[in-house]
Amino acid sequence: MCSNKETTLDAVMDIILEKLEAGGTVTFTPHGTSMLPMLRDGEDVVVLKKPQGRLHLFDIPLYRRDNGQYVLHRVIDFCRDGTYILCGDNQFAKEKGIRDDQIIAVVTGFCRKGKPYAMNSLRYRAYVNFWYYTRLFRRIWRACRRRMGLNQRIKEKKTDADQ
């Protein structure tokens, strides 16, 4: 019998680590919006395996921050000291200094609406390159939209005050 019970990663981390150490894979549904549009909050399923050596540019590791929080973010650069710089696809703040000992697993694929997507497919690689190299333009666009929204609300307040 299958159970779709939700649980925290802390509650099952020992089982996950055991499965990964044995060479297996682990699947789970991540929560949060930091990896939008690739991973949708509570809808898509990721497939994880233990990393073989160092991570590569654009890999998506599951790692544990020093504060105990588990995170899935993309490798976007490397520091000179050998640590990683990571960032969510839907974020602009870079997280520097992620060490190899913090890395638990790496995403090898994901499923959306039951359809599997491999991380080495041409379609996925095109998405990653587009999303990464348009980062500056997306940041500017988001800032402009935010400003336009603030300006619109200010105009509405002035109109309401005038009446």
Image (cartoon, rainbow, N blue to C red):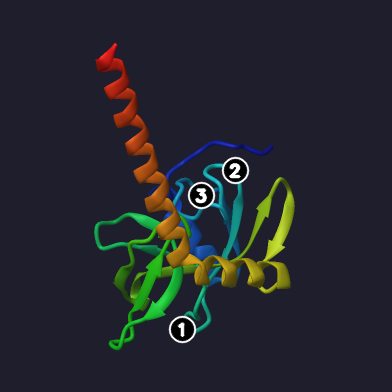
- Mark 3: which amino acid? Pro
Q: Quadrant of residue 79?
A: bottom left
- Mark 2: which amino acid? Glu
Q: Quadrant of the N terminus?
A: top right
Q: Which residue is mark 2?
A: 43
Residue 162 drawn above or below residue 44: above
Residue at the image position 73 percent from the left and 48 percent from the top? 114
Q: Give the class, few, some or many, for how many residues have Cα within 10 Å of label 1's Cα (few <14, many ≥20).
A: few
As helix, strand or loop, the secondary structure at mark 3 comes to loop
Residue 82 visible at all = yes
As helix, strand or loop, the secondary structure at mark 2 comes to loop
Residue 158 drawn above or below residue 122: above
Marks 3 and 1 sit apart, C-alpha to C-alpha, by 23 Å
As helix, strand or loop, the secondary structure at mark 1 comes to loop
Q: Quadrant of residue 22?
A: bottom right
* Extreme residue toward the right, this view: 115
**Count of marks placed on residues:** 3
Q: Earlier in the sequence, mark 3 or mark 1?
A: 3
Residue 119 visible at all = no
Q: Quadrant of residue 76?
A: bottom left
Left/right of residue 2 with respect to residue 86 in the rendered view: right
Q: Which residue is mark 3?
A: 30
Q: Earlier in the sequence, mark 2 or mark 1?
A: 2
Looking at the picture, tell me which residue is in the foreground, 139 or 162: 162
Marks 2 and 1 sit apart, C-alpha to C-alpha, by 29 Å
Residue at the image position 61 percent from the left and 51 percent from the top? 45
- Mark 1: which amino acid? Arg
Q: Give the class, few, some or many, for how many residues have Cα within 10 Å of label 2's Cα (few <14, many ≥20).
A: few
Residue 44 % position (x, y): 61, 48
Q: Which residue is mark 1?
A: 54
Residue at the image position 52 percent from the left and 52 percent from the top? 36
